[in-house]
Image (cartoon, rainbow, N blue to C red):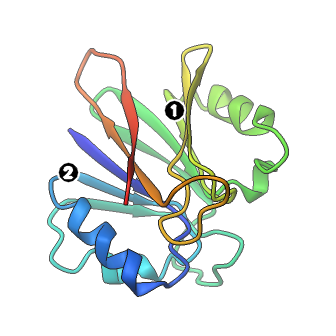
Amino acid sequence: MLVAVVSDTHGITEYIEKVKRMINKSDILIHLGDNITDLEYIIKNYNGKVYGVKGNCDFSNNYPVDMIVEVLDKKLFITHGHKYNVKYDLNSIYFKAKEVAADAALFGHTHQSLVTQHSNIWLVNPGSASLPRMSKRSIAFIEVEEGKPLYPYLVEL
């Protein structure tokens, strides 16, 4: 299965259109907040499963702050990241992922893309699709196969 991960779109239509074109082949779409309402636009004509969490710039009560998504035999902890102080370090989000026995923690908030593994837990930040900081506009994909390790990677817009 292919999981597309998007964050920090911030309502900028030009880049949201690029995201829409890039996610078509994915089976699952995850939006990590800041503008979670963009998700409703992105998923028009999208046929996969959709999950989203709200970020620090989102005020909708229709989405949780974090959640766990199970994909085949893998568990993904998803959050925007502000609650875990990801701008300063990754300890809190790592230990939360470990606490919930997640295979990966997916987060945004920093607008900086990151794919790294620590003690068998992937930490994946797709960066910002619209307003990157010290990186290019990007989204992430995660290949998930039963019984095999996750394969997360970044794609520039």
Instruction: Classify residue 73 as left or right of residue 99.
Output: left
Instruction: Classify residue 108 as left or right of residue 129.
Output: right
Q: CA distance from mark 2 to mark 1?
A: 18 Å
Give x and y (percent) for residue 140: 41, 47
Residue positioned 59% across, 52% down in the render: 135
Residue positioned 71% across, 39% down in the render: 93
Residue positioned 39% across, 36% down in the render: 153
Mark 1 neighbour class, 10 Å CA radius: few under 14, some 14 to 19, many 20 or more: many
Q: Earlier in the sequence, mark 2 or mark 1?
A: 2
Residue positioned 73% across, 29% down in the render: 95
Taking depth in this image into account, of 149 and 115 the one nearest to the observer is 115
User: On the rendered image, what quadrant is the C terminus found in?
Assistant: bottom left
Residue receiving disc 1: 104
In the depicted structure, whether residue 112 falls above or below residue 21: above
Dot 2 lies on which element?
loop
Dot 1 lies on which element?
strand
What number is the disc on residue 93? none
How many numbered dots are placed on residues in this image? 2
Taking depth in this image into account, of 104 and 127 the one nearest to the observer is 127
Give x and y (percent) for residue 106: 54, 45
For the residues bearing labels 2 and 1, Cβ distance under 8 angstroms: no
Give x and y (percent) for residue 24: 17, 61
Give x and y (percent) for residue 141: 34, 44
Quarter-of-image position of residue 42: bottom left
Mark 2 neighbour class, 10 Å CA radius: few under 14, some 14 to 19, many 20 or more: some
Residue receiving disc 2: 27
Residue type of the residue flagged with mark 1? Ala
Residue type of the residue flagged with mark 2? Asp
In the depicted structure, whether residue 2 falls above or below residue 137: above
